[in-house]
Amino acid sequence: MHPIFSQLEVFGVIPVVVLDDPADAPHVAGALQDGGLPCAEVTFRTAAAAKAIEAIATSRPDVLVGAGTVLTVDQVQTAVAAGARFIVAPGLNRKVVEHCLQHNIPILPGVATPTDVESALELGLEVVKFFPAEANGGLGFLKAVAAPYRSIKFVPTGGIQQSNLLSYLKFPRVLACGGSWMVNPELLAARRYDEIRRLTSEAIHLMLGFELRHVGINGSSQEEAAQASGLMSELLQLPVKDGTSSIFVGGGFEFTKKKFPGDHGHLAIGTNFARRAKAYLERRGHSFRAETASEKDGTLISIYLQQEIGGFALHLLQL
């Protein structure tokens, strides 16, 4: 898979932006970046698209900018010359796709039917846009279409909102989702960049779903863990579950039989997507203890942060 697609997969959400004034572009890109999503698909639905892409690429080089609603090879060339790093199209135009593949330009052409998917596979594509997602039957239809074609992933776009974002992302065949609700026309017209930042941050936290799962309290032996867990169970009338390296009391307390990371213990923070959460926190300047990473079927499921809070390590866990 192209590295750009790997980046989009980590982001999870691709903001779709329609700009009438290129002067707005750096402000919009900045709001998206500050909100946690250094990414934008600027659509060629307006004459300002190329200059808007150029403005983002120049002023916000850390933002991954792409061009959407690309219909012709000429538009591909214009977009790439302006600084677009990926191309998105509403349909599957063979000339456009073949040009992009010949020049190693990542492209997400739109598909809506099994025939479209087979055409994409024939061209050697690994990722396509599912469009228009909701109008075309939504997640149920996508699952039915995806079932026979195990080697391809999808980027649903069209009708994606906060209310259905998570259900799409939890389908393993979805690479990321495209959405415009964070940068809707009313906000752009009013230049409400603060609201764009807030909605972007809200979308990130909806996707990641951070929540406290349990408190881990460090012990040094089986006896110490048994004594502490027994007392907690007696106080709160919660069940005890003995494990290999720790004892759980209810679902909220873990008493370890040996020292885990953290001076006093750890706080287990649940998330819907550990890999995306790790990348998001790294973009925020946080670091992780690589030696503590745990994977299942090649997917990150848990890892400790370097930082501690009040003597407690932070343990990221995929739900």
Image: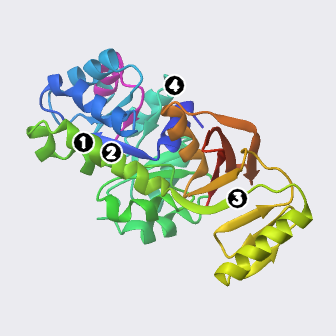
Disc 2 is placed on an element classified as helix
Label 4 element class: loop
Q: Nearer the viewer, residue 233 or 45?
A: 233
Count of number-bearing discs: 4
Q: Secondary structure at mark 1?
A: helix
Callout 3: SS: strand
User: Would you name the residue on which mark 4 appears?
Assistant: 104
Vertical order, 64 against 163 (above or below):
above
Q: Amino acid at mark 3?
A: Gly
Judged by depth in the image, the label closer to the viewer, 3 or 1, is 3
Between discs 3 and 4, the one toward the N terminus: 4
Q: Nearer the viewer, mark 1 or mark 4?
A: 1
Image coords of residue 101 (percent x, y): 50, 30
- Above or below, 103 against 254 in this view is above
- Closest to the camera, between mark 2 and mark 3, is 3
Q: CA distance from mark 2 to mark 3?
A: 32 Å
Residue 81 highlighted magenta (yes or no): yes
- What residue range appears in magenta? 75-90
Q: Nearer the viewer, residue 171 or 245?
A: 245
Residue under label 1, please give it. 196
The Cα atoms of the two marked residues, 4 and 2, are separated by 30 Å
The residue labelled by disc 2 is 200
Instruction: From the top left corner, tell me how far across and down residue 227 is, in percent.
Output: 83, 70
Q: Amino acid at mark 1?
A: Ile
Q: Amino acid at mark 2?
A: Thr
Crowding near pointer 4: few (<14 within 10 Å), some, many (20+)?
few
- Say whether disc 4 or disc 2 marks the residue closer to the N-terminus: 4
10 Å crowding of disc 1: few (<14), some (14-19), many (20+)? many
CA gap between label 3 and label 1 equals 37 Å
